[in-house]
Amino acid sequence: MSVHLENIRKVTTQRLVEMKKRGEKISMLTAYDYTMAKIVDRAGIDVILVGDSASNVMCGNVTTLPITLDQMIFMAKSVMRGVKRALVAVDMPFGSYEGNSREAISSAIRIMKESHADCLKIEGGEEVAESIKRILSAGIPVMGHLGLMPQSINKYGTYAVRAQEDEEAEKLIKDAHLLEEIGCFAIVLEKIPAKLAKRIASELTIPVIGIGAGGGVDGQVLVIHDMLGLNNDFSPRFLRRYANLEEVMDQALKQYSADVKSGSFPNENEQY
Ligand code: KIV
C-alpha cells in the first residue's frame, strides 16, 4: 500500500484500538533517522518505533543498554521530521525510568517535549508499574513491552525464547493484564511461544503486537535493518527478510569504486 500524502489521516493510539476491534492487523517497524522514516511512512506502515535497538544497529553496541536518553531524543527528532501518517513511539532507554517514578516522568517529558513524538514504549511489568502510571498521568500514551526484554539481557544471560515454563508464563499473563488495567494503549510481546501470545491477545482489549510471538496477535513489528537484509549476521527463526540490501549496497559501492579508479565516473554529462 502506498499512502497519498495529501489525504493523510494520522494514526493515533485510539485508531490502533479500533483496528484491533475490527480484526485489522497492525504493521510496525523501527526507524532511527529522517530518510528511513520518510520511506517507512510513505509505505503505509502504521507504527514507527524509534527503538533502543538503535544501540545495536546504529551504534554497533552488543546490547541495548548503552544508548542514552540524549541519543534517543536526537533520533526521535529526526524521525518525526520525516513522518506524516504513522504513529511514532519512542523507547525509553535503560536507566531512564526504572529508579523511581519522578525520574521516569522527567525522562518521558524530555522525550515528548524535545522530539514531538506521539507516545513511548517501556519494557517491564509490575516492577515498573509506578513509573508507567506516573507517565500516563501526565497524558503521555505508553506501549508496554513484555516477554524477552533486551534491557534485561544481563539477567537472562541469553536471547532464547522466554516464558516457556509455567511460572514465567503466569507472571507474563498477570503483567499483561496489569498493563492494560493501568492504561497502556498497546503491548509488544517479544519472543514467547505463539500459543501464549495468542491467549494474551484474545484476553486483552488493547492491541498486542508481536515479534517472534506468532501470528495469533494483533500486529507485527520487526527491526528494519533485519527485515531489509542490512544486518545479515542476525538470523533468528522469526525473521522474514524482504530484501537483501547488504548485497545491493555492496554491488553499488564496488561499482562506484571501480568507476572512480578507472576514470569512467564522472563522465561528460556528470560535470559542469
Ligand atoms: O528496540 C526495538 O527495536 C524493539 C523492538 C524489537 C520491538 O523494542
Image (spheres, rainbow, N blue to C red):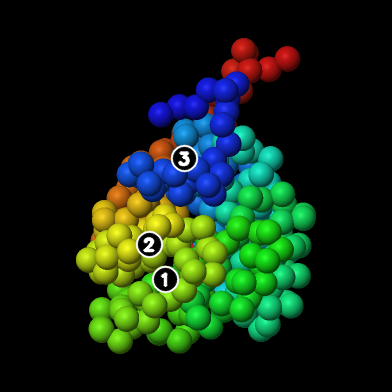
- Identify residue type, mark 1: Ala
Q: Within the image, what quadrant is residue 198 found in?
A: bottom left
- Identify the residue under disc 2: 204
- Identify the residue under disc 1: 176
- On-image quarter of the N terminus: top left
- Identify the residue under disc 3: 45
Mark 2, mark 1: which one is toward the viewer? 2
Label for residue 47?
Answer: none
Residues 267 and 219: in front is 219
Extreme-left residue of the structure: 195
- On-image quarter of the C terminus: top right
The x and y percentages for residue 62 are 50, 72
**In the visual, does 82 lie left or right of 248?**
right
**In the visual, does 131 lie left or right of 186?**
right
Mark 2, mark 3: which one is toward the viewer? 2
Q: Is mark 3 within 8 Å of ligand 1?
A: no
Please determine whether, in this image, residue 123 is positioned above or below residue 6: below
At 51% across and 58% down in the image, what residue appears?
185
- Identify residue type, mark 3: Ile
The x and y percentages for residue 7 are 57, 23
- Identify residue type, mark 2: Leu
Q: Secondary structure at mark 3?
A: loop
- What is the distance, in whole Å, between disc 3 and disc 1 at their CAs? 25 Å
Residues 66 and 109: in front is 109
Q: Are marks 3 and 1 in contact (CB under 8 Å)?
A: no
Q: Is mark 2 within 8 Å of ligand 1?
A: no
Sequence-wise, which precedes: disc 2 or disc 1?
A: 1
Residue 84 visible to an observer of this rendering: yes
Mark 3, mark 1: which one is toward the viewer? 1
